[in-house]
Structure formats: C-alpha cells, structure tokens
Image (tube, helix red, strand yellow):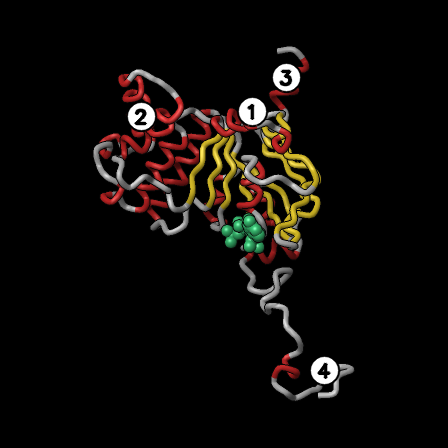
Amino acid sequence: MNTAAASAADAALVEVRGLRTVLSGKTIFDGLELDVPRGRITAIMGPSGTGKTTLLRHITGQLAPDAGTIRVDGQDVPRLGRAQLFALREKIGYLFQNSALLTDFSVFENVAFPLRQHLDLPEELVRNIVLTKLQAVGLRGAAGLMPSELSGGMARRVALARAIVRDPMLILYDEPFVGLDPIALNQVLKLIRTLNDTLGITSILVAHEFAAVARAADLVYLIAGGKVVARGTPAELTRGESPWTRQFFGGEADGPVPFQYPARELALDLGFAAPAGGDA
Ligand SMILES: Nc1ncnc2c1ncn2[C@@H]1O[C@H](COP(=O)(O)OP(=O)(O)OP(=O)(O)O)[C@@H](O)[C@H]1O
C-alpha cells in the first residue's frame, strides 16, 4: 500500500468537525467534533434529547448542518448530490429499536427486501445470501415465520440480518437494546460485536445502557450541551473524574444534568414571596 492509500485506510470512517445544528430555534450541536475509527464499535451516549439520533441523521445526509462538516468515507455528506447520497446510503445498514419489520412479509422476505429493492439478482443467489445472513444471527430456522410470530429479541435479530444483507461498510444502531430481556439483550450485544469483527464493519451504537455499551464498544463519546464532554474507552470513562462522567456513568441523579427542570424560585410559586421588582 502506498502512503496515500495507507493514510486513507487509517483515516476515521466518519469525521465530524465544528458541527452546528439548530432545530426550531434550539441549538442541538454547537461545535461538535468526533471521529469514528474504521472497523471498530463507537458508542454515542448522552442525556435524552442531546441529539444522538440527530447525529445519525447527519451521517446519512437526511439532515443538513447549519455549519461544520460531516465526512463519511472521505465524502463531504452535506455536499453530495442525490445520486452520490443514494450510493452512500446503500453502504450503510440501520437497526432501530422498533426493528421496523414489514408485517405482511415473512422473515425471509424481510431480509431479502433490500436485495430485491434495487438489485436484479438471480433468485438462487438471493436465497443463498438471505439464508447465510439468517444463519449469522441464528435464525435460519425461522425464515418461514411472520413477524407477528417472533419475540422482540428475534425481531431485532431479523432486523440485524436485514441490516447486513448488502454487506454495509457502516451500521448505525439506534437504541438496539430497548425493551429486550437480559437473554435477548446479550444475544443482540454478542451479535453486534461478532458481526463487527467478522465482517470488518464499522459500527456506531447509540444506547443508554452503559453496562451493555461497556461490553460492546471500543470507544465511547459522551455528548451533552451540544458538544463532546468525554471520550475514551469504556474503562477510561468509568474512571473519569469529570462531573459529566461521574453523573452519567456513575448514575447520579443530580449533576451537570440538573434534577430540577428550570423554574422560578419555589417561594414565588407558593406565593410566599413577591418577584424582584414586581408589585405582587
Ligand atoms: N425535526 C426536528 N425539529 C425540531 N426539533 C427536533 C427535530 N428533531 C429533533 N428535534 C429535537 O432535537 C433534540 C435532539 O433530539 P434527538 O432525538 O436527536 O435526541 P436523542 O439524544 O436521540 O434523544 P433520546 O436519547 O431521548 O432518544 C430534541 O430536543 C428534539 O426534540
């Protein structure tokens, strides 16, 4: 490999620089910077409403930033034309918490769907690919079932098979553990790790469950107040001394994310005091 090729391979798959996003007058990101290394699992964590899903929408080009750059595999996403954006999205797999399976289609047809949508492959090849992916998630035997016959954990695994059916370079997991019992959660967790390692995929994992994230992720970003407030391996963040890491990973109820929703003084609401400078 020459030097230029080597440095391209070393570069992060996703690079976010100076990202600023304002939605309905609310600043979601204010100078966000992050790198997602190739071939690794990078977790994005942060308080509710901090913009984790919004970040995924920037990465897929569904949402343009107000300022800053988002590069995926060297491509400047907000500047891509329709066809280039389409081509980029073809290389990204998604797994959402509701699994989003098509209820009228069997497990097999759900997994086959991305192959049938845009590719004209011979039926035998479709069958081989689908069964191989179902085998990878342990559900080849469930190919003939309908989504209504699946448990939540099985549905998530079918959605995972569908997410990898076109051999993506990047998978985005948005809250993949929500609503799963401990056994199903561990199965999905193990699959995320195994698929990442065996298929050489890069994974971005948005999740709230730090214990699960700590077992799956190589790198964790903690986002709050529109910026990255901590970055490191799960072990580094667990030992972190900043108020953010202590509250978030120590599970403290109060801290930089206040327990009290902003309000005026309690005495005012209870009628024990008059507002400063007011008559009442
Ligand atoms: N299209 C939109 N228009 C206006 N505000 C939006 C829009 N989409 C998201 N928001 C707001 O942006 C903020 C970030 O939302 P987002 O869903 O990205 O947060 P999150 O970190 O994924 O939250 P959670 O952990 O609860 O899923 C929220 O305050 C949300 O209400």
- Dot label at residue 275: 4
Q: Indicate the amino acid at tag 3.
A: Ala
Tell which circle, 1 or 4, labels the residue nearer the N-terminal end. 1
Q: Residues within 10 Å of mark 1 (few under 14, many from 20)?
A: few
Within-10-Å neighbours for mark 2: few <14, some 14–19, many 20+: many
Q: Which mark is residue 6?
A: 3
- The answer to whether residue 222 is visible is yes
Q: Identify residue for label 2.
A: 130
| Nearest to N terminus: mark 2 or mark 3 | 3
Disc 4 residue type (three-letter): Pro
What amino acid type should be assigned to the residue bearing mark 2?
Val
Q: Is residue 130 left or right of residue 33?
A: left
Other-residue count near label 4 (Cα within 10 Å), few / some / many at <14 / 14–19 / ≥20: some
Q: Element type at marker 4?
A: loop
Tag 4 and tag 2, C-beta contact below 8 Å: no
- Residue 23 in percent (x, y) is at 62, 50
Q: Is residue 114 above or below residue 249?
A: above
> Left or right: 160 with respect to 227?
left
Q: Which residue lies at the image location 55% right of the left edge and 38% below the top edge?
A: 62
Q: Quadrant of the N terminus?
A: top right
Q: Which label was assigned to residue 84?
A: 1
Q: Position of residue 2 (x, y in %)?
A: 65, 11
Q: Sequence-wise, which precedes: disc 3 or disc 4?
A: 3
